[in-house]
């Protein structure tokens, strides 16, 4: 007897979107899922304009959740996951507001997760293979694999949230995304926590999805780093410092970030991408992150 596919929806966080790109993504998703949940991260006039909101409200398959203030991506993801679960969905695929979503991607990810689930591997999440967008000079994320692949499916240490299909029962068991992180590291921390609780994470290498990380790249010897604006870079430094304190974050990641982050800051400084005083501000951000909460 054929087992029915679990009910699946899509979720997107929105803040000052490129409306043409967002509408194109929503048009693709309309044929893929019964509902798209949008979390607008801030009030009208800040996160969206009145006209942008009206254009989104005109789409009956789009369910809008709006915050009265900017609360960050972690809080937005938690609101979206809770809303999807309350509306009877068992899986949720997260996308960015500028994601390049191919037709059939959502169905492919859900089918891949079902193949892993029937093997008893307890998948918490499954995502596409990140690749650099053709029109972008940015660097795509890479994953660390564990053990042999199951067909095109690779067991990985963590997943980035964009394109990630989450099992909502696993999300409730593992717990919500850590809101102390706000933005960077949200997906990493949750991934490590899920693995610590006995779940697995998977990348479907047969389902590529373009990503744009930063605005370019900067090189230091053989190492290539994504080029980020100062605000995003300081948030990244704070997040990585916070994760150093968390017991479920593996030692290999803590060693990696302890080496990688200072090298990235050095590359920014040497190549002239660091504004005056940025290194000092980065040290302050690291101190703030290391002394922050993070109690999961």
Image (spheres, rainbow, N blue to C red):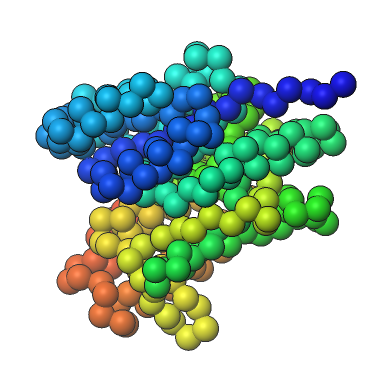
Between residues 231 and 141, which one lies in front from this camera angle? 141
Between residues 234 and 144, which one lies in front from this camera angle? 144
Does any portion of residue 133 appear in the rendered image? yes
- The quarter in which the N terminus is drawn is top right
> Is 140 left or right of 265, judged from the image as shown?
right
- Can you tell which quarter of the image residue 116 is in? top right
The residue at 50%/78% (across/down) is 223
Between residues 48 and 294, which one lies in front from this camera angle? 48
Vertical order, 280 against 287 (above or below): below
Does any portion of residue 174 appear in the rendered image? no
The residue at 63%/53% (across/down) is 207
Q: Position of residue 257 (x, y in %)?
A: 51, 61
Q: Position of residue 15 (x, y in %)?
A: 27, 40
> Is 175 left or right of 289, judged from the image as shown?
right
- Can you tell which quarter of the image residue 276 is in? bottom left
The residue at 26%/75% (across/down) is 273
Return the residue found at the far right.
1
Vertical order, 154 against 24 (above or below): below
Q: Position of residue 130 (x, y in %)?
A: 55, 58
> Is 6 left or right of 24, judged from the image as shown?
right
């Amino acid at each position: 007897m054929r087992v029915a596919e679990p009910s699946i929806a899509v979720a997107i966080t929105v803040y000052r979107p490129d409306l043409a790109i967002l509408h194109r993504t929503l048009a693709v998703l309309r044929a893929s899922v019964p509902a798209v949940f949008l979390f607008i991260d801030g009030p009208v006039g800040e996160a969206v304009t009145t006209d942008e909101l009206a254009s989104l409200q005109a789409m009956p398959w789009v369910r809008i959740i709006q915050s009265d203030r900017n609360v960050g991506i972690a809080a937005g993801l938690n609101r979206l996951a809770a809303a999807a679960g309350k509306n009877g969905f068992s899986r949720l695929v997260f996308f960015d507001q500028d994601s390049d979503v191919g037709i059939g991607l959502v169905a492919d990810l859900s089918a891949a997760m079902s193949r892993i689930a029937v093997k008893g591997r307890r998948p918490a999440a499954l995502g596409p293979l990140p690749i650099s967008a053709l029109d972008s000079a940015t660097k795509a994320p890479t994953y660390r694999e564990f053990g042999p692949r199951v067909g095109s499916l690779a067991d990985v240490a963590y997943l980035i949230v964009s394109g990630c299909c989450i099992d909502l029962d696993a999300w409730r068991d593992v717990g919500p995304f850590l809101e102390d992180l706000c933005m960077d590291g949200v997906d990493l921390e949750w991934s490590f926590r899920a693995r610590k609780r006995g779940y697995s994470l998977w990348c479907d290498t047969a389902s590529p999805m373009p990503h744009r990380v930063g605005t370019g790249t900067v090189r230091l010897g053989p190492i290539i780093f994504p080029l980020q604006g100062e605000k995003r870079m300081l948030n990244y430094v704070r997040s990585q410092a916070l994760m150093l304190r968390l017991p479920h974050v593996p030692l290999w990641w803590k060693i990696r970030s302890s080496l990688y982050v200072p090298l990235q800051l050095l590359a920014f400084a040497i190549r002239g991408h660091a504004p005056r005083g940025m290194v000092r501000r980065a040290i302050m951000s690291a101190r703030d992150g290391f002394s922050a909460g993070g109690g999961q």
